Image (tube, rainbow, N blue to C red):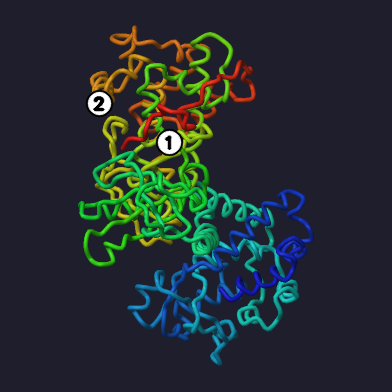
Amino acid sequence: GNLVRAKLAGWWKSSFFLSSPFLKMHGGAFEHWMPRFMLRLSAIFYALLALSPLNVEASGRVAGRSGSSGPNLMRNRLHPSAAAPHLFSTRLRVNNKASRRNSLLAPSVWKVHHSDKVDQSSQRRISILEKPSVPRLSHAVAKAALLPLLAGTSKAALAATVGMDTPLLTQIDAIPPIVSENPVLAGALLLLSSAYLGASPGVGGSIIDSLLLAPLQALEVSARGTPTRDCMVVGNKIGAGNFGDVFEALWTKRPLNTQRVSGVPTNEIRERLIVKRVKMQEDGAKRLGEVEQYMNRRLLRSSPGVCAPFIGSFISQEAQSGENEQLWLVWKYDGLGTLGDYLSERDFPLNMETILFKREQKGTKVEREARVVKELTRQLLQNVKAMHDAGIIHRDVKPDNILVSESGKLKMLDLGAAVDLRNGFNYIPDEAILDPSFAPPERFVMPETTPKPPAAILANLGAPVIWAKNQPDKFDTYSVGVILAQMSVPGVRSMDPKQFARTLQNFDQDVADWRLKAAQSLGWDILDADGAAGFQLLAKLLDPERSKRPTASQALSSKFLASFSLASLSPGTVKSKPSPAAGGGGGPERRH
């Protein structure tokens, strides 16, 4: 830990890795086969790891006799010529059994210094491990970071970089030959470490988020402030649910004596808002409110634009007096209509043509409808992909939870059911939070036998393995398939979503078999165009076997969507009537 920190300190003194001694030590060997940006990116990850709270604790001293496993392990590390090469180990022999049991989970590691004892067999001084007074880097992280960084580095070169007075450096005679003599192996270790940090759902991204982005966001929120009840005028209710009601509101510059939105002077308006008043007296409402705050903040940091702009939350004054506790969640106004509202109109999908493209397109009716459906599907999959890249599964993707903004962009709503699989937040193995009309047949985002997540930092380190094994992101892509069927097939759109789900169950989730036997007349023109590329994508998204379902990224690369882009559209005549979402009158209201 001392060595890694010292080396990182040396890097900071060398123009932030741009001309780092690490590159100089290797004589430019890495530059011949590895891009410089990979080295810099990996170095940043290792720096964050070195500063992270992943720590180890043990207390007492390693036994000093020659046959004990502790000195042997350390002697192999510090003096590889004295025994068979042993790279690193996190198992330490200590006199305190309780500390031995907890040595992988506690908040500091051993520091190393010389003792006066001499190992008779090797005539080398025995190194002593002693608990430091400040937290240190864990052995597991040191192992991951140290090997690639020190590969092929001599003690002299290292001393020139970090200084001979570095405590741990004074005890190192050489780097283990298995690494120092094989730069290709060292490079492979570096690449593997970087690949694991970048693998879904993003260990490296989580470290950056927790150590850098989250504190910056907290500072920004503190500087900007959040509305209070006396500086907020609540208007019409635009939605209601089991756990809360949604209202239009105005954030005023100062407390006003009016309770009507129409009575607020324009020069007193600070921001137009959408607010949700959480019914704290309902069972589970408080938890869902907390989850929604967490998810909105996380996505605002990692994927701004995926959700409605979240401002923050506050507790009403009634809660502070102990009566009628109310939690308010606050978003910037970004449109009232949901995709579900537009789906319910008879002229869908052409009712969204000018909202998405700002003009009426040329072509036949089917061609124009296909463009709208493709654009909506593309935006929805991009939002879902961005959530998955951040390690978040929505679990309740449906038209009523998709906002159509004034600019024609889709935004995800109602994140109270979402789960963060980077750290296990809001994940309970045997709990299924879903809408059965849009959820896949397996019902659970991961198998019920999946154990409860451990501490956040440990869950984060194991997240890529869990993600690769269970493919939780394909839970949401099934829901996208149901929405695609509603948007593209008039007969499905006119069905109750529950009826559509039951129909698929009756045909063993085989949409092709159902179409062939009972649904030929429902209107498949949009999906049958371009060699039935749309129907092929639909069948894959609705596949009952999760392993055969495409991810959001794979669906975006499908033939149905890959050949479509806004830039390829031919401009037509601009419609004179305003879009409903732009406030032209008669626009649909958001419903919950």
**Camera-side residue: 374 or 256?**
256
Residue for point 25% across, 23% down: 505
Q: Is disc 2 surrounded by few (<14), some (14 to 19) or many (20+) residues within 10 Å?
A: few
**Camera-side residue: 331 or 526?**
331
For the N terminus, the image quarter is bottom right
Residue for point 57% across, 25% down: 358
Q: Secondary structure at mark 1?
A: strand
Q: Secondary structure at mark 2?
A: helix
User: In the drawing, does residue 571 fall left or right of residue 327?
Assistant: right
Residue 91 x/y as whole percent: 44, 70
Q: Which residue is mark 2?
A: 498
Residue 217 x/y as whole percent: 52, 59
**What's the residue type where badge 1 is placed?**
Leu
Residue 435 x/y as whole percent: 28, 35
For the C terminus, the image quarter is top left
Place residue 523 in its image quadrant.
top left
**Res 548 visible:** no
Mark in the foreground, 2 or 1: 1
Image height of 247 relative to 362, above or below: below
**Camera-side residue: 427 or 86?**
427
Q: Which residue is mark 1?
A: 403
